[in-house]
Image (tube, coloured by chain):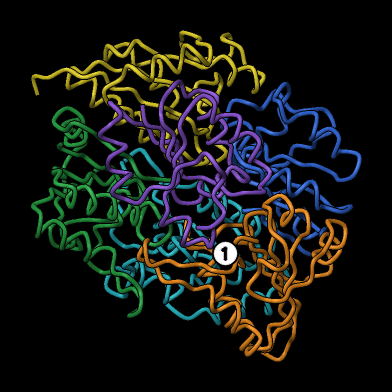
Chain colours: A green, B yellow, C blue, D purple, E orange, F cyan
């Protein structure tokens, strides 16, 4: 099946970004396609290129970038939510792109299932 | 996007305390613009979003409640409120900014079941 | 002691915990917690019962924003931000029930 | 329909609302909601009552993280992330109770 | 900082679902390093932070629960748990990682009243 | 009196940053001193120099910067929390400084009241 995933919270503060990532990995391992991950609300903070978690912690942003690269997952950050929160091309991590809310609607129409992770 | 799917937006949070209600409205408007079949549901504290008389000057946040009145202009006409949620908050239909369809718990559950995409805020 | 609560009691148990624990102090409701002090909500009886033990305040700008400015439960005192500041100085310490 | 809940029922009313509304579908507890499916918590009776109406699942990695892997209420099914994926495909739609 | 004040840290949230428990511990350790009078309180879902046997490999988040055991080494010895919160969660002292003082609601309320600074997480 | 304020959530997502700001202004108007505002957890996102809210919305970050300038309020961002979330010198807004958690302890010892705003 073709999956869309929505992430509504930033990295580290809530577990939702972790859960979304582990769900995406499991879906791919199960032979499904993760077509798009859409980052909304504080979820846009997952796309910051500047995060530096402690050495012994997971690197949430890099994990997403790697997933995008290895499995051609489309990582889309909502432009309106991102501007409010200071995520722009200049601090955007690899593998993410900034676009409009239409991409979320499309994730609903073009996938078989759309799963939301948030607070 | 030629496909039309049933999109339901479930609003469960009060306005202003968090941004979810406001950013949910932005998605609703876009989804309607893409000619999808849109339903809005107000459950639990989400019914507070529709309360008449919001005056936000004192908290310096924009009052976005007039947008609910504008939804009709975007052909968003299916607004549902859970009766139990309204009752528990001391609200009646007269307190709400817009006309809504009031549903029982069983009716609301059945309506959710028949959606293609459910987005919650 | 001033207890500050910011969550709706219909969604979150913070206010209930606070009222259980608060001694003879003051309780200030801000943000979504102001719904607790409005007439006809299902938490109203619990709030009224607590009025015998603590003094309860609600932030007027937050009530107004939510269209609830005219629904305050009798016995609860509305304050503006200036009143909020005064509550923090008249109590010797404070705690936010996040 | 698959209902996904991620909040502790001792702090937040999301699970209670979900169980009230859910028809004959599946309910999956993840993150802090897994506490609802552990033996001896005060929400347990409500959860047990719902087992007559819906099938309830809990995410094992979240139970383990919280030291609750050995306390699952009888009648609740533990699943891993792969099982979570299967629940989303076996149900025709899903909803997160955020 | 020559003044010594009574700092109380009130933990009301479960671990892992949010970062508050972890970042609260970081503040506790620093406050102790500054030789302040530190008390830790675990209320409501906060008592879950102290549950034995946390194994976080499956969620790929660092298990920080051993830090509670290390608190003694930083002279943080006043750990209080609300009895009512523990009971409501089916937990007993045997389930906890560290020795704690179990307080009733009235005792906990009195302890809070006498603090200089209360930080909640 | 001398106040310290703690902000635990980012701008826009939660009302806490708004409430903290309005409290600070009211305290100053009442003749008190706001000695320090400490930004912790997602609160560090209040210090992003890159936010661009819609024209008709309040600019939360600029509001803090202006408060710092006009009333000599010390705006301190926790370095560990900030690194995790991608707030660094390069995207730090005017009037904020990055420092350690010791500054939060100091806000507790050196002020008469420490008030926390969060989620």
What's the residue at 47%, 36% (across, down)?
D56
Q: Is residue E38 depicted above or below A60 in this figure?
A: below
- Pick whichever, B62 or A87, lies toward us: A87
Q: Is residue D78 left or right of residue B114?
A: right
Relative image position of residue C97 (x, y in whole percent): 66, 53
Q: Is residue F36 left or right of residue F92?
A: right
Relative image position of residue D54 (x, y in whole percent): 48, 28
Q: Is residue D43 left or right of residue A4?
A: right
What's the residue at 45%, 80% (across, down)?
F99
Q: Is residue E56 depicted above or below E38 in this figure?
A: above
Relative image position of residue E3 (x, y in whole percent): 73, 87
- Pick whichever, D61 or C16, lies toward us: D61
**Chain label for disc 1:** F
What's the residue at 67%, 52% (across, down)?
E89
Q: Quadrant of residue C60?
A: top right
What's the residue at 65%, 61% (across, down)?
E47
Relative image position of residue E33 (x, y in whole percent): 61, 88
Q: Quadrant of residue B2?
A: top left
Residue of label 1: F6
């Amino acid at each position: 099946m073709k999956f869309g995933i929505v992430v509504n919270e930033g990295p580290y503060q809530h577990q939702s970004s972790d859960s979304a990532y582990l769900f995406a990995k499991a879906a791919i391992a199960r032979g499904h396609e993760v077509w798009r991950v859409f980052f909304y609300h504080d979820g846009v903070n997952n796309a910051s290129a500047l995060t530096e978690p402690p050495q012994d912690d997971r690197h949430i942003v890099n994990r997403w970038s790697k997933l995008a690269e290895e499995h051609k997952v489309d990582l889309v950050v909502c432009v309106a939510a991102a501007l409010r929160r200071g995520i722009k091309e200049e601090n955007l991590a690899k593998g993410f792109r900034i676009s409009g809310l239409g991409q979320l609607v499309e994730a609903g129409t073009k996938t078989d299932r759309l799963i939301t992770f948030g607070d | 996007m030629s496909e039309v799917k049933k999109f339901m937006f479930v609003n469960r949070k009060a306005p202003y305390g968090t941004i979810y209600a406001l950013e949910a409205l932005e998605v609703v408007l876009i989804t309607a613009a893409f000619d999808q079949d849109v339903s809005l549901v107000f459950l639990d504290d989400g019914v507070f979003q529709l309360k008449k008389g919001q005056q936000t000057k004192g908290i310096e946040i924009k009052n976005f409640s007039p947008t609910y009145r504008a939804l009709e202009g975007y052909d968003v006409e299916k607004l549902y409120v859970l009766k139990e949620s309204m009752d528990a908050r001391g609200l009646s239909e007269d307190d709400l900014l817009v006309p809504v369809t009031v549903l029982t718990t069983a009716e609301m559950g059945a309506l959710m079941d028949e959606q293609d995409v459910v987005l919650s805020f | 002691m001033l207890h500050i609560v910011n969550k709706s009691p219909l969604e979150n148990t913070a206010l209930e915990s606070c009222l259980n624990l608060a001694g003879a102090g003051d309780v200030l409701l801000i943000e979504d917690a102001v719904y607790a002090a409005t007439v006809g909500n299902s938490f109203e009886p619990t709030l009224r019962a607590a009025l015998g033990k603590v003094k309860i305040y609600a932030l007027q700008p937050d009530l107004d924003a939510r269209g609830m400015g005219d629904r305050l439960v009798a016995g609860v005192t509305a304050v503006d931000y200036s009143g909020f500041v005064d509550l923090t100085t008249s109590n010797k310490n404070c705690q936010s029930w996040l």
